[in-house]
Image (spheres, helix red, strand yellow):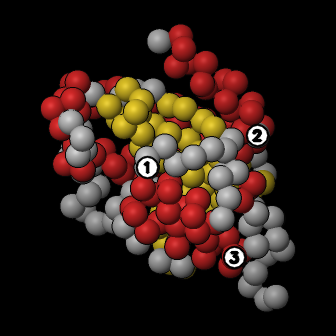
Amino acid sequence: MKGRERPDSAKLIVGLGNPGPKYAETRHNVGFRVTEGLAGRFGISIRSRLCSSIWGQGRIEGHAVRLALPQTFMNSSGKAVQCLLARWGVQPSRLLVVCDDISLPVGAIRLRAEGSDGGHLGLASVLQEVGTQQVARLRVGIRTEEARAFQGDLTEFVLGASGVSERKALEGAVAVAVEACEVWFTAGVHAAMNRFNRRIRER
């Protein structure tokens, strides 16, 4: 079909977050920041619009990659992701979802090849719409001591901006997560897991 690449010709990396300047600096938008960091590293412009997302395409070590940021708001991210997969003929095995994780300490990252949503509503939406839990995901930790004060309802915490004390750790995690995305793309999820999940245990 004209204007459409053959199925599986490019891998897709999707960062989860909420659109608009109001949410740009919030903890919940770490997925956006990692994906934007990867775009900057490889000179990819994320400006095109499709499937309620902004996206861009470029190359990593000579191979095509697409980067996308759903604009549906976090809890409906799956509708945008499934639309992109269907439009481009990308299989879930060639998708990486990047998101925040309140269960991980700020500064830590964790890759998994598959599994449950872990209580993350954006990831839950993706898994539901895609129809499988066999989707690679890269989580970036945002939990701080401050999070304890919010007890059961952490909405206000995740939608808050990172404090000065945590900003350096979060920026470092974003930089490492960008590197992890590159390794996932070039060497696969298990190679990336072996390399980057070990860093958590060594902390």
Residue 170 placement: quadrant: top left
Residue placed furthest toward the front = 152
Q: Pointer 1: residues within 10 angstroms few (<14), some, or many (20+)?
A: some
Q: Secondary structure at mark 1?
A: loop
Residue drawn at x 75%, y 30% is 191
Q: Secondary structure at mark 2?
A: loop
Q: Position of residue 187 (x, y in %)?
A: 78, 37
In the rendered image, which residue does mark 1 sit on?
Answer: 120
In the rendered image, which residue does mark 3 sit on?
Answer: 86
Q: Is residue 73 above or below residue 149?
A: below
Whether residue 201 sits left or right of residue 173 in the image: it is right
The mark found on residue 67 in the picture is none
Q: Position of residue 178 (x, y in %)?
A: 54, 39
The answer to which of 1 and 130 lies nearer the viewer is 130
> What's the residue type where badge 3 is placed?
Ala
The quarter in which the N terminus is drawn is bottom right
In the rendered image, which residue does mark 2 sit on?
Answer: 188
Q: Position of residue 63 (x, y in %)?
A: 78, 54
> What's the residue type where badge 1 is placed?
His
